[in-house]
Amino acid sequence: MRFAIVIMAAGKGTRLKSKRAKVLHQIGGKALLEHVIHAATQIVPPQDVYVVIGHQGGAVQSAVSSLGVNFITQAEQRGTGHAIQTARQAVTRYEHIIVLSGDVPLLQPETIASLRDFHLAERAAMTILTAVPADPNGYGRVLRKSPGSAEVAAIVEDKALTSQQASVREINSGIYAFTSNSLFQLINELNTNNAHGEYYLTDMARILVQEKQRVVGIEAANATEVLGANTLAEMAELDAAMRLATARKLMAQGVTIYRPETSVIDSGVTVGPDTVIEPYVQLLGDTHVGESCRIRSYSVIENSTLDHHVLVQNGCILNDSHAHAGAQLGPYARLRPGSEIGEDAHIGNFVETKKTRIGKGSKANHLSYLGDAEIGSGVNIGAGTITCNYDGANKHRTLIEDSVFVGSDTTLVAPIVIGEGSYIAAGSSITEDVPADALALGRARQTTKAGWATSRRAQVRTTRDIEKGR
């Protein structure tokens, strides 16, 4: 049985009071729509997923186009029923259709699979995913034909509930499965006789029941999965729920997370067992942390990889970087994009790297900037070293070969090559290549004038006495 999944993502989300399309707001480090697409593509291939776009459609399509799904433009947003009418031509060849909302990021693939399987088992024309939340107010209610029955008699919107119907706690999630023939034979029966003047897909339940076709409901195991967000405060609640779930999943896999409620861990992050994450750490984007690492408080790691046994001291910032096994970073180190820190290498406090590879066992422990550089193994970079990579127009590379000792307060003016085993004297400005095993100095000779300070102090006192006499 071929299924298509249609995701509703055309609406404005006006209650958010935001200029950005609702489905592009993020929780857990990803757009709401991206979470829904991820769940959908666990059930069907991406080529069988169709996203209905409308408001800010170009931005929405651009944000998720890399996921390989199809897009259908609903030029005029006239409701969920109209969205499916718009999608009809694209999905009519499928035997069954699952309809998802683009703003329910907690929805799990297992729940979609349960909806699919129940729909097939019940041979239904329409299957409604329902839920029983703690507070059903504001949601349409699902009325069963009889207690315990799979069959649905009607869906009643919240504002239209009688006092007796208001006691029903089972809600309509807005997520459905349809048999295509039944849906498209009757979808033109939808009308706009409602407060918003829109075509509601919800009304298909009433239409199908009237036509003696089978409409059933299956309750989601976890009501929170199907709840969307209509305000930024609700969005924050969903974000907190997703991040706490991510932290719990990692802890179940052997990761120690102190004070998980203080951590910001995106849903796509992976962490190996026996790693320790201290309070107020952020692990963002496509970040992967190996086994037995320790990430200390206030560090922010984004789109980066840490191999096993890496120590990240307090307050480090890593972007698009890679630290190999046994590396030590910080405190307060900054690794900008393209940084690669070798095995057992040390990058210390207030050291910044950018597009730089540092070899095994090399150390830059204090107050240095290393940009556009290739640094070999066993190299010592003294405090205050700077690779002068930018000449005002172009960037240039610095190559420091193995076992080089660079003294403190050195400037290396690129392009330049520092040969293997060489020494750079402290306080030097090096502008020419240095051959292997050489000593390079680039500083003025020191001059010492004995007694100069005594003479200077006497001169100052005399000047002050004259000024007082005035």
Image (spheres, grey):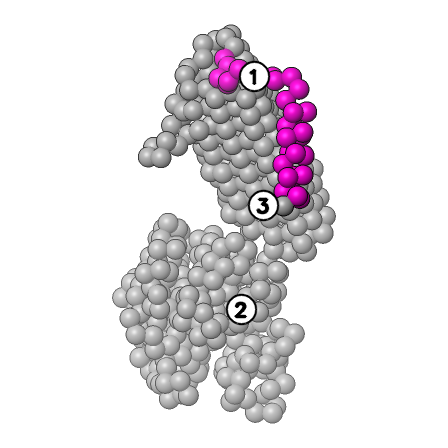
On residue 300, the disc is 3
User: Which residue is pictured at 61% across the width and 60% down the height?
Assistant: 240
Q: How many marks?
A: 3
Q: How many angstroms separate mark 2 from mark 3 (CA)?
A: 24 Å
Foreground of the two, 457 or 28: 457
Q: Is residue 319 left or right of residue 81?
A: right
User: Which residue is pictured at 60% across the width and 92% down the height?
Assistant: 163
Is residue 463 in the magenta section? yes
Q: Amino acid at mark 3?
A: Val
Residue beneath disc 1: 446
Question: Which of labels 1 and 2 is toward the front?
Answer: 1
Q: Is residue 442 left or right of residue 393?
A: right
Mark 3 or 1, nearer chain start: 3
Could you tell me what secondary structure mostly forms the magenta stretch? helix
The range drawn in magenta is: 440-469
Question: From what the image shows, is residue 79 above or below residue 287?
Answer: below
Percent across and percent down for residue 242 are 59, 58
Asked whether residue 213 appears in the rendered view, the answer is: no
User: Dividing the picture into quarters, in which one does residue 55 lie?
Assistant: bottom left
Q: Amino acid at mark 2?
A: Leu
Residue beneath disc 2: 232
Label 2 Cα crowd, 10 Å radius (few <14 / some 14-19 / many 20+): some
User: Dividing the picture into quarters, in which one does residue 314 lie?
Assistant: top right
Foreground of the two, 384 or 177: 384
Question: Which of labels 3 and 1 is toward the front?
Answer: 1
